[in-house]
Image: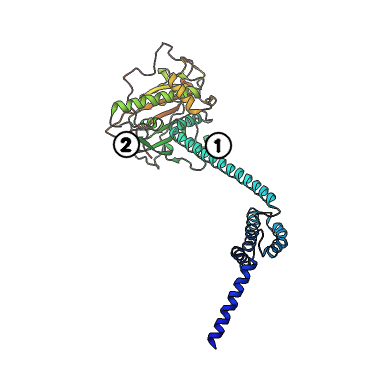
Amino acid sequence: MRSRDTLRAVAIAAMAVAGCRVVSSRADYAAYRTFRYAAEGSDRLAAASEYLQAQPQGRFRPEVQAVVNATEEDYWADHRASLDGLNEYLRAFPAGAHFDEARQRLAVYERNRQQAEAARRTAEEADRQRREEEHEASATRARMWGRTSFDRWVRLFAGLNAWGRGVGEIVQGNPEFGAAFENTPPQCRASHCRRDYVQDFFIPVPGRSAIPRRATLSLDMVRFGTERNVNQVFTVMRNRGLTQWWELETQGAADPADPQAREAAVRWTMDQLRAIVAASFADAKETPAELYGPPPEAMVMGGEEDENAAPEAVDANACVIPSQPLGTRWSALVGCANVTGRPFTAPAEAVQAHSQAMGVPAPAVTARACLRIDAYAALDGEGMPTDEGISLSLIPACATPAVVAPTRPGARPRPPGRPAARPAAPAP
């Protein structure tokens, strides 16, 4: 009985297969099965489109075509407004009624994508160039730190109102000066008010690690008498600072133990300081010997000052000219109406270098008092590095009645061979 049932089932299956072969081909039926059993959505519609393309005379074409016709318009309405939707439509209806429009819309999306990509690349390139320019500008500012610092402070100090008065009066009478010390005021003791600025940098050396350096610019306002009036200001760089300025700006290394290398660096910076003063003060003159002041006293480098010490009394009727620093290489007068003489000049190469480094020339400064500007480089004493830079000293009016500077060609404030060194003011 069981064998008879099995034979009957096999016969029925054979008849069914034979019937399909009569009505449809094997390929036609296989394509239809793919459509029939495909998941709903774009997969089933894609299978329907594939069937219609592959079986133009297929047995099941009317059924499949009816599904496509009933679905395409709603599908198009739901998918035409986005890039992914258009791609889904073309996948589901590769030969659909809206094929051309879908391709046109995709072309618009592609153009917009390409334009957005080009804009992105342009913005990235502009941002890269901006960062490079900022990095280069920052590197240039760091490299020009010594020059711009001297230029700024020499101009600012020389143009001060209230020279010969207390620090408080100077701050009140000079808003720009007050703003410079607003965040970090100078540290004041009995006879000095000081503030330091630091610049760390590296000197590149081919084939080896860069050499680290630290340059320190010190502003030192010297206060005299019981009234603690400011009659002298030092703008100096600590520890063989002019050599460090040369290293920073030229990106070269100078062996501090090599006297010739150090002297070459000092000569270069002295020329740059001359160019700064010549560019800042149109009326600058060479200082006559009558206004050098008394010989300076040697001071111990690094000596600590007693901040509680009482300042020495100063005779208000005395006509005192402040001493020049030891090691003065050149000296100029600015703002001295009663002094005539040879104009102060700088080497042409230094003037050109300063103009190029500063970019836009700054206007000349009008000195508010008769000031002597001395550039000095102190010789190292007892193996200790010394401070170097510029001092500005107030010349009292009583010292300049009709003072005439020497006009002999080639005359200098000090004869060659006499540039001794004054160690800088005691460290705070």
| Local SS, label 2 | loop
Q: Residue at x 46, y 14 (%)?
A: 342
Q: Is residue 267 above or below residue 52?
A: above
Q: Is residue 259 left or right of residue 38?
A: left
How many numbered badges does the structure rendering display? Answer: 2
Q: Is residue 258 left or right of residue 214?
A: left
Percent x, y of residue 359 = 51, 28
- Residue of label 1: 172
Q: Nearer the viewer, residue 421 or 55?
A: 55
Mark 2 neighbour density, 10 Å: few (under 14) some (14–19) many (20 or more)? few
Amino acid on which disc 1 is placed: Gln
Q: Is residue 411 left or right of residue 176?
A: left
User: Does the residue at mark 2 contact the one at mark 1 (Cβ under 8 Å)?
Assistant: no
- Residue of label 2: 207
The image quarter containing residue 97 is bottom right
Q: Nearer the viewer, residue 271 or 10?
A: 10
Distance of label 2 from label 1 (alpha carbons): 53 Å
Q: Is residue 328 left or right of residue 112?
A: left
Q: Residue at x 48, y 42 (%)?
A: 184
Percent x, y of residue 367 = 52, 25
Amino acid on which disc 2 is placed: Gly
Percent x, y of residue 37 = 61, 68
Outermost residue toward the left in this view: 382
Outermost residue toward the bottom in this view: 1
Quarter the C terminus occupies: top left
Asked if residue 248 shows in the view, the reply is: yes
- Residue 249 shows which numbered tag? none
Asked if residue 228 shows in the view, the reply is: no
Decide which of tag 2 and tag 1 comes sooner along the chain: 1
